[in-house]
Amino acid sequence: MDGNGRWAAERGLPRIKGHEAGAEAVKACVKACGELGVKYLTLYAFSTENWKRPREETEALMALLEKFLREKTDEMREKDIRLTAIGRLGDLPHSCRVELERSIAATSNNKRITLVFALSYSGRAELVDAIRLLATKVKNGQLDPDEITEEIVHQHLYTNRWPDPDLLIRTSGEMRVSNFLLWQISYTELHVTKKLWPDFTEIDLIEAVRDFNSRIRRYGAI
Ligand code: FPP
């Protein structure tokens, strides 16, 4: 969800105002995904690298996330949205983790759409965590290294319960993957839009899905 800072700068506002507008765009995007029949939506809300930002900004982002969870959990429960999260969630402030765990538990039986927040997430950190789990199993004699397959790696990722993404949308025109779901996006279609995240609307989502529908996916075959 890139471009919040630039959105604010264009208006002469502090960066946090861009993040607030970004949180509004999250609400609109989840609603639009529900209407379009998207089953899984993963939002890259905070990377492991984002902790390098000034403390004022990281604290404001955590407060925004907490506010979102407090205000939206009941609605998610009613609208059959299952909320979950990936990343090094232990890095989050205690009050944020409590709110997150509450929302996850409150929506755990929901089925219509799975909304995944990537928080203190990076694809490399996820791979490191998976490798540690695998190495521990090998060390304890629970796993033979020759048995490690792509499927076994998949089972040790944070995302082991879900299919790989079909479509990755990157806002603000950046042509980078930025450490997002590195293993999972091997065959994901990429859609880059110049729109800054707070300006990303249902129309932009429909355009991205249309673009996706025009692709021929060969998965390395002919
Ligand atoms: C990247 O834009 C955005 C973030 C690091 C934070 C994303 C957070 C939100 C959209 C709001 C809170 C989230 C939830 C789930 C309620 P940037 O700050 O790097 O923008 P820039 O590249 O223009 O500076």
Image (spheres, helix red, strand yellow):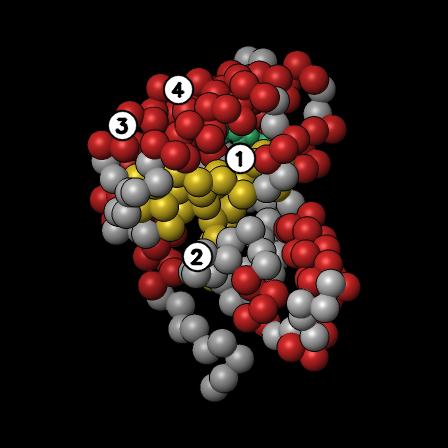
Which residue does the image show at 40% across and 46% down from the upper left? 41
Tell me, for residue 70, which label it has, or none: 4
Q: What separation in Å lies between label 4 and label 2 (alpha carbons)? A: 26 Å
Q: Secondary structure at mark 4?
A: helix
> Quick one: label 1 or label 3, which is nearer the N terminus?
1
Q: What separation in Å lies between label 4 and label 1 (alpha carbons)? A: 17 Å
Say if residue 203 shows up in the picture.
Answer: no
Query: Do tag 3 and tag 2 residues touch (Cβ < 8 Å)?
Result: no
Q: Callout 1 environment at 10 Å: few (<14), some (14 to 19), or many (20+)?
A: some
Query: Do tag 1 and tag 2 residues touch (Cβ < 8 Å)?
Result: no
Near-viewer residue (35 or 106): 106
Mark 1 or mark 3: which is in front? 3
Mark 4 or mark 1: which is in front? 4
Identify residue type, mark 2. Answer: Trp
Residue reaching furthest bottom? 222
Which residue does the image show at 43% across and 73% down from the upper left? 217
Q: Which residue, given by chain and number where applicable, does mark 1 sit on? A: 45
Identify residue type, mark 4. Answer: Arg
Identify residue type, mark 3. Answer: Glu
Which residue does the image show at 65% across and 31% down from the upper left? 91
Percent of width and height locating residue 196:
49, 34
Q: Callout 4 environment at 10 Å: few (<14), some (14 to 19), or many (20+)?
A: some
Percent of width and height locating residue 64:
49, 20
Q: Which residue, given by chain and number where applicable, does mark 3 sit on? A: 75
Identify residue type, mark 1. Answer: Ala
Q: Callout 3 environment at 10 Å: few (<14), some (14 to 19), or many (20+)?
A: few
Which quadrant of the view contains residue 58?
A: top right
Q: Which residue, given by chain and number where applicable, does mark 2 sit on? A: 162
Q: Secondary structure at mark 1?
A: strand
Percent of width and height locating residue 33:
31, 44
